[in-house]
Image: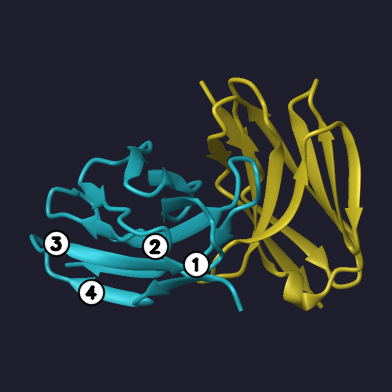
Chain colours: A cyan, B yellow
Amino acid sequence: DGGITQSPKYLFRKEGQNVTLSCEQNLNHDAMYWYRQDPGQGLRLIYYSQIVNDFQKGDIAEGYSVSREKKESFPLTVTSAQKNPTAFYLCASSSTENSPLHFGNGTRLTVT
Amino acid sequence: GQNIDQPTEMTATEGAIVQINCTYQTSGFNGLFWYQQHAGEAPTFLSYNVLDGLEEKGRFSSFLSRSKGYSYLLLKELQMKDSASYLCAAMDSNYQLIWGAGTKLIIKP
């Protein structure tokens, strides 16, 4: 079955540490996205990539970094520069720019 | 600026009908999406409207009025499993999605 896999489901880190969230898809989609979801707010776009070896900043890219070395993979690194990293992180992919997003099951990151 | 408004929470009874409204303001428009999200899970796609009118898909229907910047999601014959958050998202001229905060739907027996 095709889909998007995010790992781990829960992640705990100490303040000041970088952490990398994994996202893998086998849908053969060109576009991949990282969103952050906080209570009472809409999804906010962190980074997106429409093709391998290329990515663009979203609305809240500060304190985050990504890479897109393979079509299937789009890992997100939450750096120590991110002021408020505790959140639910969702990875998504789409086949074309106006087609529906397919989401992974999310990673809930807690930083203390 | 760009924004989306939808009610924070709604309550309905099992077997009934509920309408969840969404109003949007975007720079250009390339369609409106509805997603369902159960607590702690990923959003799943429900519907996409780009032309005015009603799209029906089983118990769920979605309506769009581009001139009014308005959409609604209609859920019929409500079941307990429909308890979830419903996310409205409008796509602007750059194909960027603007997301609402979601409507939490509570179904009572």
Which SS class for mark 2? strand
Which SS class for mark 4? strand
Distance from the alpha carbon under mark 4 to that under mark 2 = 12 Å
Q: Earlier in the sequence, mark 3 or mark 1?
A: 3
> In the rendered image of this protein, does residue A59 appear above or below residue B102?
above
Rendered image quadrant of residue B78: bottom right
Q: Position of residue A18 (x, y in %)?
A: 14, 61
Distance from the alpha carbon under mark 3 to that under mark 1 = 22 Å
Q: Residue at x 35, y 42 (%)?
A: A55
Q: Which residue is mark 4?
A: A12
Mark 3 vs mark 4: in front: 3
Q: Earlier in the sequence, mark 2 or mark 1?
A: 2
Is residue A88 found left or right of B28 in the rendered image?
left
Marks 4 and 1 on same chain: yes
Read off the chain for label 2. Answer: A
Q: Which residue is mark 1?
A: A104
Q: Position of residue A32 (x, y in %)?
A: 46, 52
Q: Which residue is mark 2?
A: A88
Q: Which mark is residue A18?
A: 3
Few, some or many residues within 10 Å of mark 4 (<14, 14–19, 20+): few
The amino acid sitting under disc 4 is: Phe
Distance from the alpha carbon under mark 2 to that under mark 1 = 11 Å
Few, some or many residues within 10 Å of mark 2 (<14, 14–19, 20+): many
- Between A4 and B107, the one lying in front of the other is A4
